[in-house]
Image (cartoon, rainbow, N blue to C red):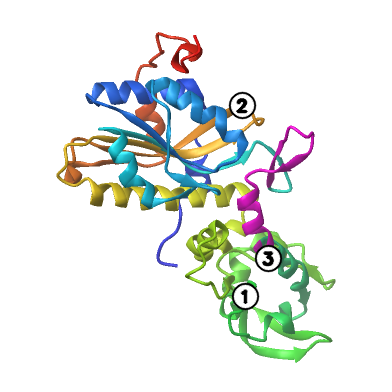
Amino acid sequence: MPIAPPSEVLLDNPAMELMDLFGRMRSLADAHNFQGTLPAVWQCSDESQGIKQALFGYAFDCPTFNLGRVGALLDPGRLTPASHHGQDLVILGGSHHGIHEEGGIGYVERVNGHSNSCCSMLFRVVEPYLTLYRRAATLITLYREVDGIKIEIPYKYLFRQPPGDTPQIHVLLRQLVDGTAIRESSHGKVYRLSAKFADRHQLALSDLNKEPRSIGTLLDAHSFRFIRHLDKYDPSPAAILEASVLDFFPDIVTSKRPHRRLADVNTWRQFHLLASYLTDSFDNSDRSILMIAGLTLDHSIRRNTFVPQFGFLLDEGKTLQARYFGPDEVSEWLQAQPVFRPQHSFLEYAGAG
């Protein structure tokens, strides 16, 4: 794959309290002389994001404009209307994830008392791919013979089919085996395990014996790919999301935290998509734009914290001088700013004080 998302370790920055984050963003905007500032978000429409959106507007003393769709997908068509509602833009965005994890899936408790996957949209997209991967990791087996380690691959992973309406997993034999099959098995073929693969996983294979053992997590992201026929005209958020991350699903499903990994990959894709739109749309304008993207952690449907992962700053439309902040520097950039505190109460901001 010619491009890969930032590593999980790099994206796992310390989480910030919302008003701490928003106060630092406000200080940045003030330091760069933002005028007529309109706060905007692209985020999932989940109810757990509502209080966060309200507090973001509170920090900038202006209700928040929505740039996003369910699943934290950016809607570029909303960017032009947003620019008509204010002069300079401060944008917050990214996926959200339930902080309570089980089996690599994040959960949050809803008002009905039920605990559900969060973000549910992301879970529904990743689930069939995760099921395919885990089944393959169970059914492909390894065992040791006198002349070396063998790998048995069921026929279902050897027969190739054209892309269909449901995802398929294609095992990449060149990554797993050396040479042609040495014999048939009851439901597949047996090969010599690739010497390069064996060297890469020498420690994990050291206790392998003649009893077959599932390949498990040794079936890494380089050993398979997913294919699926995707309707490029399907406007549904699930279809758009799936198409945007299809190439990255091997990386996602092999993570110990696949649900969170998908959230991070989606944020990474959408951040750079929006940054591209911003530089194209506001080149040589007089507008300034600040954007922070990252992962919202849902402690409950009422409380969130935020993991900063990416930053973007455009001063007065000077796109050639636009600054990008990656995962390794965005937190440091924010922490260097003082925390602005609104002088009026939230009820006063809402016109109810």
Report the side of 12 relative to 128 (left or right): left
Query: Which corner quadrant of the image does residue 63 belong to?
Result: top left
* Disc 3 element: helix
**Residue ID for mark 1:** 165
Q: Earlier in the sequence, mark 1 or mark 2?
A: 1
**Point 65% across, 48% down: residue:** 120
- Left or right placement of residue 255 versus residue 189 in this view: left
- Label 1 close to label 3 by CB (< 8 Å): no
Residue 258 appears anywhere in the view:
no
Q: Residue 301 is drawn in which quadrant?
A: top right
- Residue segment shown in magenta: 105-129
**Closer-to-camera residue (154/273):** 273
The local crowd at label 1, few if under 14, some if 14 to 19, many if 20 or more residues have their Cα within 10 Å, is: few
Q: Amino acid at mark 2?
A: Arg
Q: CA distance from mark 1 to mark 2?
A: 38 Å
Q: Secondary structure at mark 2?
A: loop
Identify residue for label 3: 133
Q: In which quadrant is the N terminus drawn?
A: bottom left
**Foreground of the two, 249 or 300:** 300
Q: Would you call the spot at circle 2 few (<14 residues within 10 Å), some (14-19), or many (20 or more)? A: some
Amino acid residing under circle 3? Tyr
Q: Which residue is mark 2?
A: 303
Report x, y in % for residue 6.
Answer: 45, 50
Q: Secondary structure at mark 1?
A: loop
Residue at left offset 75%, top offset 67%:
135
* Number of numbered markers: 3
Circle 1: residue type: Asp
**Residue 209 shown left or right of residue 32 in the figure:** right
Q: Quarter of the image holding residue 184?
A: bottom right
The front one of 345 and 243 is 345
Whole-percent x and y of residue 224? 59, 71
